[in-house]
């Protein structure tokens, strides 16, 4: 969620982030009045923030007439279904990037300088005659590569499991 809040803030500003956070954490419907009270913000700012969130599909509302005052009250809540889809698609994007990295690691042989840790592809290492261009130490095959591949595969598997679970509806 923290990632999503940051994303929303960068896109729409701090008011929108705060409204989303309050709605999400209260786990119930809130009126515009309740929100502006909790935030100490003007009703107009809250309404603007809610409209932004509505446009992006992150919140929904229900209208109801107050029997005492006769005024129409809007009850807002998080659009959980959409929120889940958004989180899942962000995770899918991360998986894709990790897969690209994994392919890159698997397709290339790497060499490292044991002195300063610089890392080179086989082509680069050959270009430098298997000698570190910074310090002149002979390059060695990178033995950390297998560990990197292992970690990447683990993280990808975990994320894929999360996405599967979330797609099923937890
Ligand atoms: Zn070196």
Image (cartoon, rainbow, N blue to C red):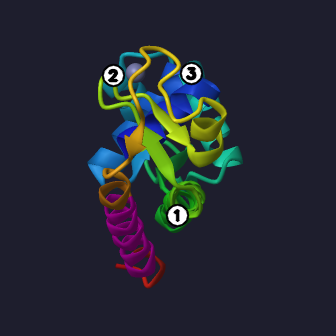
- Residue where numbered disc 3 is placed: 13
Q: Position of residue 43 (x, y in %)?
A: 52, 22
Q: Which residue is mark 1?
A: 106
Q: Nearer the viewer, residue 117 or 77?
A: 117
Image point 60% across, 58% down: which residue?
A: 100
Q: Nearer the viewer, residue 160 or 79?
A: 160
Residue at 42 percent across and 35 percent down: it is 139
Q: Magenta stretch mostly in which secondary structure?
A: helix
For label 2, being within 8 Å of ligand 1 is answered yes
Q: Nearer the viewer, mark 1 or mark 3?
A: 1
User: Counting residues from the N terminus, which is met first, the one under dot 2 or under dot 3?
Assistant: 3
Label 2 Cα neighbours within 10 Å, binned few <14 / some 14-19 / many ≥20: few
154 falls in the magenta region: yes
Q: Which residues are magenta?
A: 149-165
Up-down relation of residue 48 to residue 141 (above or below): above
Q: Secondary structure at mark 3?
A: loop
Q: Is residue 121 among the parts visible in the rendering?
A: yes
- Measured as percent of width and height from the top left, residue 107 is found at 59, 62
* Residue drawn at the location 34% of the way across and 79% of the way down: 170
Front in this rendered view, residue 3 or 77 = 3
């Amino acid at each position: 969620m923290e990632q999503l809040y940051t994303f929303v803030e960068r896109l729409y500003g701090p008011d929108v982030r705060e409204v989303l956070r309050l709605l999400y954490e209260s786990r119930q419907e809130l009126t515009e009045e309740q929100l502006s009270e909790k935030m100490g913000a003007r009703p107009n700012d809250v309404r603007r923030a809610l409209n932004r969130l509505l446009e992006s599909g992150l919140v929904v509302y229900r209208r109801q007439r107050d029997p005492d005052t006769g005024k129409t009250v809007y009850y807002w809540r998080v659009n959980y279904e959409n929120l889940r889809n958004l989180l899942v698609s962000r995770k899918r994007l991360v998986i894709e990037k990790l897969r690209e990295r994994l392919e890159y690691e698997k397709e290339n042989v790497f060499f490292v300088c044991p002195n300063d840790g610089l890392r080179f592809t086989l082509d680069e290492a050959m270009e430098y005659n298997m000698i570190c261009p910074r310090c002149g130490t002979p390059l060695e095959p990178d033995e950390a590569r297998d560990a990197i591949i292992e970690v990447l595969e683990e993280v990808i598997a975990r994320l894929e499991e999360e996405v599967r679970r979330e797609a099923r509806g937890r």
